[in-house]
Amino acid sequence: MSNRMMVTGAGSGLGREIAVRWAREGWRLALCDLDEARLQETLRLVQAAGGEGFIRRCDVRDYSQLTALAEACQSQFDGLDVLVNNAGVASGGFFSELSLEDWDWQLSINLMGVVKGCKAFLPLIQQSQGRVINVASMAALMQGPGMSNYNVAKAGVVALSESLLVELRGLGVRVHVLCPSFFQTNLLDSFRGPTPEMKAAVGKLLESSPISAADIADYLYQQVLVEAFMILPHEAGRQAWEGKRRNPEPLYAEMAYMADRMRAKAAG
């Protein structure tokens, strides 16, 4: 039976909720994160929900740690059915203020962490003719101002997912990409950017979101069942994406206006 899943960034937020949602269906979960205490808590919740599994501290920037985790899935679960590349960090700042180190840090985790996850686990997923679920963001599609490195990393995740979708379809592997907008999460714990104002602005958006990580995990579960590729859990996000595809110019004008306001506010 197909019931073996690996989730990166499973210690909290969306990663934890995805693990718990699948655990409710009796799945076995391999959980990885940098924070072992949070992983222990996720495993407890997974077991309480009816699942089982194991935890492993893992940094998605380190390919050898990911391949070791793939080997652990092989030895403990005898394979894997679903790979969830969820680990990610937040960052922001205008392009002129972002250092090249800011770019390297963002891309190494949010984009290359997903590339390395796919690379390490694809042999197992091909073997089981399973699924890859990559977590991107609406930032991949809408590219708001003051977060160019985050936008680029997440757009890369969408492009990677589209590439895998077409390359792997003939091999029986299904691919999904999840693009949530802001939702209630602890993403700000990892926030990195040149201005405290940017962090405060993002914090406000996260707090004002009516949708929780658990809601998104449930929406993802339902959409995977119907084989959706690009999964947009927010109604406003779906409308915005539809509008941009029809006529992007009004959106660019709105974003440029937002950028001007952000600059004026930062200037005090």
Image (cartoon, rainbow, N blue to C red):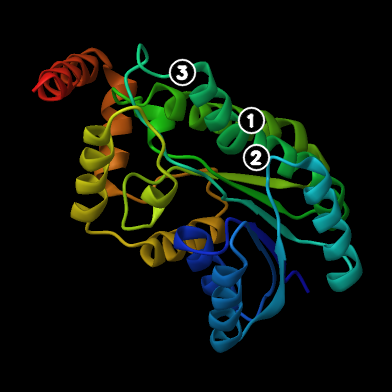
Q: Position of residue 69 (x, y in %)?
A: 80, 57
Q: Could you say which disc has been placed on residue 114 in the image? A: 2
Give how far across and how far down residue 257 sits, in percent: 14, 17
Q: Which residue is mark 1?
A: 160
> Which amino acid, mark 1?
Leu
Give the SS element for disc 1.
helix
Pick whichever, 168 or 267, lies toward us.
Answer: 267
* Up-down relation of residue 249 to residue 47 (above or below): above
Task: Find the distance from the CA under tag 1 to the CA under tag 3.
Answer: 25 Å
Report the Cα–Cα distance between label 3 and label 2. Answer: 22 Å
Of callouts 1 and 2, the N-terminal one: 2
Residue drawn where x is 40% and y is 42% of the image: 191
- Kind of residue indicated by mark 2: Val
- Image height of 250 relative to 191, above or below: above
The disc placed on residue 186 is none
**Which residue in the structure is indicated by mark 3?**
99
Give the quarter of the figure containing the C terminus: top left
Please give left or right for residue 42 compared with residue 126 in the image.
left
Q: Which of pointers 1 and 3 indicates the residue nearer the eye?
A: 3
Mark 3 crowd level (few <14, some 14–19, many ≥20, 10 Å Cα): few
Q: Can see residue 121?
A: no
For residue 130, what is the image quadrant? bottom right
The amino acid type of the residue labelled 3 equals Ser
Mark 1 or mark 3: name the one nearer the start of the chain. Answer: 3
3 or 2: mark nearer the eye: 3
- Does the image show residue 19? yes
- Label 1–label 3 contact, CB within 8 A: no
Element under disc 3: loop
- Secondary structure of the residue carrying tag 2 is helix
Residue 147 lies, with reference to residue 191, above or below; the image says: above
Query: Closer to the N terminus: mark 3 or mark 2?
Result: 3
